[in-house]
Image (cartoon, helix red, strand yellow):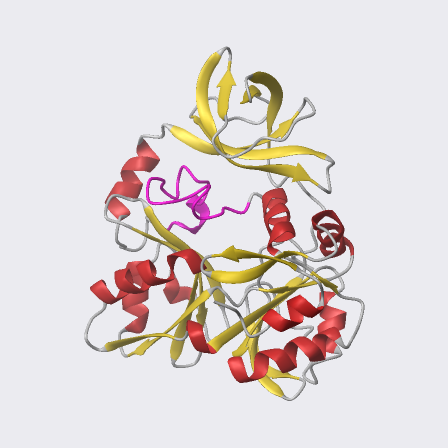
Amino acid sequence: MQTLLYQKHIDLNARMVDFAGYQMPIQYSGIVQEHLSVRNSCGIFDVSHMGEFMVSGENTEAFLNRMTVNDITILDAGDAQYSAMCYDDGGIVDDIVVYRYNDWFMMVVNASNLEKDFMWLNKHKPDDVELVDVSAETGLIALQGPDSRSILQKAVKEDISDISFYTFIVSKVGSASATIARTGYTGELGFEIYADNDSIQHIWDTIMNVGGITPCGLGCRDTLRMEMKFCLYGNDIDETTNTIEAGLGWITKTHNKDFIGRDAVISAKENKTRYLAAFEMVDRAIPRKGYTIFADGKEVGVVTSGTHSPSLQKGIGLGFVQFGKHKSGKELEIDIRGKMMKAVIVKPPFYKNGTVQL
């Protein structure tokens, strides 16, 4: 499949790859250049492959509160919330973002989990809740970087300076109506812009015409999220992991609400066996998913994500490490193609100068 911005990517000489069934740009000018543009100025991403569900009806709030680990009830219209859904055994169905409108909610899910998530929600929803998959009719553009606000403001008549982190407005970009949200996956000041397919090309062109923007592919989206220790479903979290060991206890509200998997998550909190640690390479090497982690001469875990950090100029990684061996400063060794390479656990994020809260 192709997003409606496919031809834009071809015209910009993007290198295209198949991702979650879509032809998506992996890079344009190069991953490092695109990464540093987002850190220092502004980058634009087509993330229209993501899934969007519209949820409405009288008992929608109660339904979504049971389906997700975070507390939906604290959201006002115009608020967004990072959350996750769990199976009965505490395993993660998906990590998601929920947006609350006046009389309905939008749930944004990972592209590779779209069908699974929809079936999971549909299986549990009451008859008075309507669940509609609007993914095929919805485009999504991410504008990320310290200059993103000033650039987007030139394309939007309404003042966007008051859109705080994890809130949104419905306004116009150029002449097209869109949801403009202060959300993102990079650790920088940024916006995610949702619009109907009929409008998404116009919105892309309107923003690009402002100038000062670097088109960015999925390659640097991964290095940017890695530097922040943002989890990637299928790597760092999946149905075999729970939110506690993945470092997502901060979104998991076991004390004041019920949700599917709550008992298993409470048990995991009381019986910790491993933790998703962030580590930097001491030796010159790049860790990759599946590499074995050692500490004190013994195998203690496995790498879930790894890359070369363009900002830090060194190898960085995430991996599940035996609980007790996961503390900051702990020295590790990573088995990289038969060679033991030194690493050290650090306190995330790796990159500490992000502008996300500005």
Residue 86 position within the rendered picture, expressed as x and y whole percent measured from the top left: 31, 51
Residue that protrudes farthest toward the top in the picture: 297
For image coordinates 64% across by 89% down, the residue present is 175
What segment is highlighted magenta in the picture? Answer: 230-253
In this rendering, would 276 be left or right of 63?
right
Farthest bottom residue in view: 175
| Residue shown at the point (30%, 55%) measured from the top left | 257
Residue at 46%, 28% in the rendered image: 302
**Residue 284 versus residue 26 in the image, above or below:** above
Q: Residue furthest left?
A: 127
Near-viewer residue (62 or 121): 121
Where is residue 283 shown, x and y percent of the image?
Answer: 68, 22
Left of 128 or right of it: where is 151? right
| Residue beneath the point at 65% across and 73% down | 162
Q: Position of residue 216 (x, y in %)?
A: 67, 59
Q: Position of residue 284 (x, y in %)?
A: 70, 25
> Residue 275, relative to residue 40: is it above or below?
above
Does 144 sit above or below residue 205? above
Is residue 328 visible from the viewing direction of this image? yes
Is 11 on the left or on the right of 248, as rendered? right
**Residue 202 sits in which quadrant?**
bottom right
- Say if the magenta span includes residue 252: yes
Is 237 magenta? The answer is yes
Residue 110 visible? The answer is no
- Dividing the picture into quadrants, the one containing residue 28 is bottom right
Q: Quadrant of the C terminus?
A: bottom right
SS majority, magenta:
loop
Is 19 on the left or on the right of 46, as rendered?
left
Figure disc tally: 0
